[in-house]
Image (tube, grey):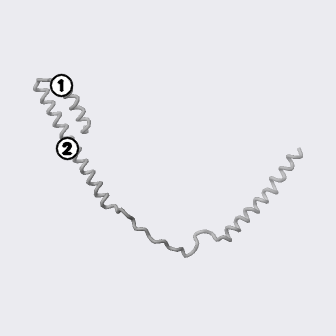
Amino acid sequence: MSYKEKQKQYAGFSDSHRNSVLQSVNVHEQSLQSNMSSAYEVYSTMAKMRNQAKAKIQERTPAFTMIQSAKMPYKASSRSRLATLLIFIMLGCIADVVWIAFLKNRSFKCKGE
């Protein structure tokens, strides 16, 4: 059981047996209280270990990163302007052929009907 569950169990038991005089109830309450305190010790130890691990990670992580200086490339990484121009001229010619061959003739047929 976790610390929170043991704490709830202890609180419920001590609330329900508040003014009890029986020794067995007191012994059971002390048992629950010791279980709760041992669970809290484990919980607090784990929390401390977690915080220490976080601190170690923070310590190892640099606050600043060294950035390399900019370098000029030896040659262009993209196509030349002439190649791009020729590709778009060819695409324009193909679009004109498609327009003239298919779409222009179809539009005249629709008007005549």
Q: Which residue is mark 1?
A: 17
Residue flagged by tag 1: what amino acid is it?
His
Q: Secondary structure at mark 1?
A: loop
Quadrant showing the N terminus = top left
**Relative to 15, 95 lies left or right:** right
Q: Which residue is mark 2?
A: 41
Which residue is depicted at the point 57% across and 74% down?
Answer: 75
Q: Secondary structure at mark 2?
A: helix
Q: Residues within 10 Å of mark 1 (few under 14, many from 20)?
A: few
Which residue is depicted at the point 88% across and 44% down?
Answer: 113
Instruction: Classify residue 41 by image quadrant.
Output: top left
Residue 59: % across, % down: 30, 60
Residue flagged by tag 2: what amino acid is it?
Glu
Q: Is residue 101 above or below residue 90?
A: above
Q: Which mark is residue 99?
A: none
Instruction: Classify residue 87 by image quadrant.
Output: bottom right
